[in-house]
Image: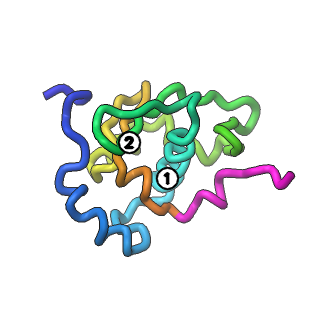
């Protein structure tokens, strides 16, 4: 079955509630967590997201290009050094294997409901927002 036609979630959907009770239950590394955090922010932006083909999923594409050392996503500024995973096919492959997305690297990804709700603990650290 082509990558873009495979169902999302699978066994990960059934254990979603119990997994979310733990901090980083899928044992993602720092690069994977940063990438997921940025993808979650992209999923909230109408410039980068549209509804996915399965309930609760979001197709994220049109990744922003850095200008200087940062780029903008909605109301947040992301430093380019925190976004290296967006250009790394291996990061997308691991997030897909963990059931968090369906990779269409380098064009984008379909994020599962689990991915959208996964608490990375990094949003306040890498999504910089103006205080005014």
Res 67 quadrant in image = top right
The residue that mark 2 highlights is 111
- The tag earlier along the polypeptide, 2 or 1, is 1
Name the element at disc 1: helix
Can residue 23 be seen here?
yes
Can you give x and y, in whole percent of width and height, for residue 111 in the image? Answer: 38, 42
Residue at 66 percent across and 51 percent down: it is: 127
Can you give x and y, in whole percent of width and height, for residue 129 in the image? Answer: 75, 51
The residue that mark 1 highlights is 31
Res 84 quadrant in image = top right
Q: Which residue lies most toward the right here? A: 132
Q: Is 123 drawn above or below residue 54 in the view shown?
A: below
116 falls in the magenta region: no
Q: Is 25 drawn above or below residue 116 in the view shown?
A: below
127 falls in the magenta region: yes
Q: Which residue lies most toward the left here? A: 1
Camera-nearest label, 2 or 1: 2
Q: Is 11 drawn above or below residue 107 in the view shown?
A: below
The one of 48 and 32 positioned closer to us in this rendering: 48
| Colouring style | rainbow
119 on left or right of 83:
left
- Secondary structure predominantly adopted by residues drawn in magenta: loop
Can you give x and y, in whole percent of width and height, for residue 21 in the image? Answer: 37, 74
Residue at 69 percent across and 36 percent down: it is: 71
State which region is magenta.
121-132
Label 2 neighbour load within 10 Å: few <14, some 14-19, many 20+:
many
Residue at 43 percent across and 51 percent down: it is: 116
The one of 71 and 58 positioned closer to us in this rendering: 58
Q: Which residue lies most toward the bottom here? A: 22
Name the element at disc 2: strand
């Amino acid at each position: 079955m082509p990558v873009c036609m495979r169902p999302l979630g699978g066994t990960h959907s059934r254990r979603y509630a119990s997994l979310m009770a733990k901090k980083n239950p899928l044992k993602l590394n720092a690069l994977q967590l940063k990438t997921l955090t940025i993808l979650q922010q992209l999923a909230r932006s109408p410039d980068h997201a549209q509804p996915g083909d399965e309930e609760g999923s979001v197709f994220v594409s049109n990744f922003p290009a850095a200008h200087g050392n940062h780029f903008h996503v909605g109301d947040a500024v992301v430093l380019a050094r925190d976004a290296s995973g967006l250009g790394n096919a291996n990061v997308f492959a691991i997030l897909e294997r963990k059931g968090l997305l369906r990779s269409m690297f380098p064009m984008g990804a379909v994020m599962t409901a689990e991915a959208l709700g996964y608490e990375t603990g990094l949003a306040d650290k890498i999504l910089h927002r103006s205080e005014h």
